[in-house]
Amino acid sequence: MADLLSLQLTLPSPSVPFTASKHKMSTKSMAASVFGCAATAAASSSSASSTTRFLSSAARATLSFSSRSSSLLSLSSSSSSLKSLRSSPSISHLFLNQGRPSSRVSNRGFSAASNPKCLASDPEQLKNAREDIKQLLKTTFCHPILVRLGWHDAGTYNKDIEDWPQRGGANGSLRFDVELGHGANAGLVNALKLIEPIKKKYSNVTYADLFQLASATAIEEAGGPKIPMKYGRVDVVGPEQCPEEGRLPDAGPPSPAAHLRDVFYRMGLNDKEIVALSGAHTLGRSRPERSGWGKPETKYTKDGPGAPGGQSWTAQWLKFDNSYFKDIKERTDQELLVLPTDAVLFEDPSFKVYAEKYVEDQEAFFKDYAEAHAKLSNLGAKFDPPEGIVIDDASSTPA
């Protein structure tokens, strides 16, 4: 179900000639997840070459703080060498996970040594960061990959695990290479490169908050509903706190409905929320050489915006609306992508109730989507203050 929430990027990987519209790779190598949609195009146009540092494998992080609003990160390591994160190529996918034949896992952390001084993000910095994200979206068309970034950080949550951060969820762990190396997250380093300058500019915004802020802002700026977000998520401090691989969905499982339920029920989500979140596939496109799904190019993607190519779920793949459900139901346009986890929304009796509703009622879809997105963004998070921070009112009072 990688298609569902996996906003895809155009990841640099060996070119593989594909001509069929649905050429399958092995699920393991593709690790296509429900959290990525085939996504955008714009990392190439904004070759953000921000230098980032990482902790060596022997590094240990100790966190001490004198109050709830301030903290200091002290790092002690037997190896004091800090290296720069190597830049990587352009992006372009959104909801499908870009699988890689092999992933090198290291303890490199994207700006791991620059954790914010405050565990709870500063409300004013959050507001300013949101404005910078809006500008980034206007120049890079990176809406799909930013949605995917937030979803994949939160989507590792396991409701059956109580302890933080072992339970996974929205905790900023996706900035570390050990998690970036998971097959389902292939290419998300490009999303990090895009927003790292914003993180450096607003150091009192946690990565966990920035990922979710970017995701919600991308939906809203693409014409989607206002997401009722709250902030103040605490970051994990080291790669040893990343979740194990395998918590994100696959793109072409043998039993799509059962797989979607296995993954999303584990997160505490229900059938209505599964279908509503699937609707985010109205954004983005899939590239066969990256994920094994879709056509190399269609009339809707051959000219971009951003890097051209791939196959989208909708004709206007940077506009958030209910066209995904209409197109999946009709299946009259061979230029548009339909994955097994898309088709099952109109085949499974329970899913079909909501999918049919969203075909007819975009307002209902927007309402249910906004609630489901907000719920997903809070999964597994530890908030400081515990009730969270709202930045859409004048006082930025806790939620």
Image: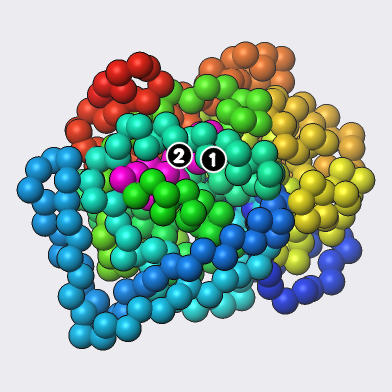
Please, which residue is most extreme toward the left here? Answer: 66
x 18%, y 75%: residue: 76
How crowded pointer 2 is (Cα within 10 Å; few <14, some 14-19, many 20+) is rated as many
x and y percent of residue 259 in the render?
53, 48
User: Pointer 2: what residue?
Assistant: 129
Q: In this rendered view, identify the residue nearer to me: 111 or 299.
A: 111
Residue 9 appears at what percent x and percent y?
A: 65, 56
Residue 226 in view: yes
Q: Which residue is mark 1?
A: 133
What amino acid is labelled 2 in the image? Answer: Ala
Mark 1, secondary structure of its residue: helix
CB-based contact (under 8 Å), mark 1 and mark 2: yes
The quarter of the picture where residue 383 lies is top left
Identify the residue shown where x is 57% and y is 22%: 225
Q: Quadrant of the C terminus?
A: top left
Can you name the residue that lies furthest to the right here? 299
Q: Residues within 10 Å of mark 1 (few under 14, many from 20)?
A: many
Q: Which residue is rendered at x = 36% and y = 57% of the image?
A: 173
Going 32% across and 79% down the picture, which residue do you hit?
56
Return the x and y of residue 296 as percentages of the image width and height.
84, 59
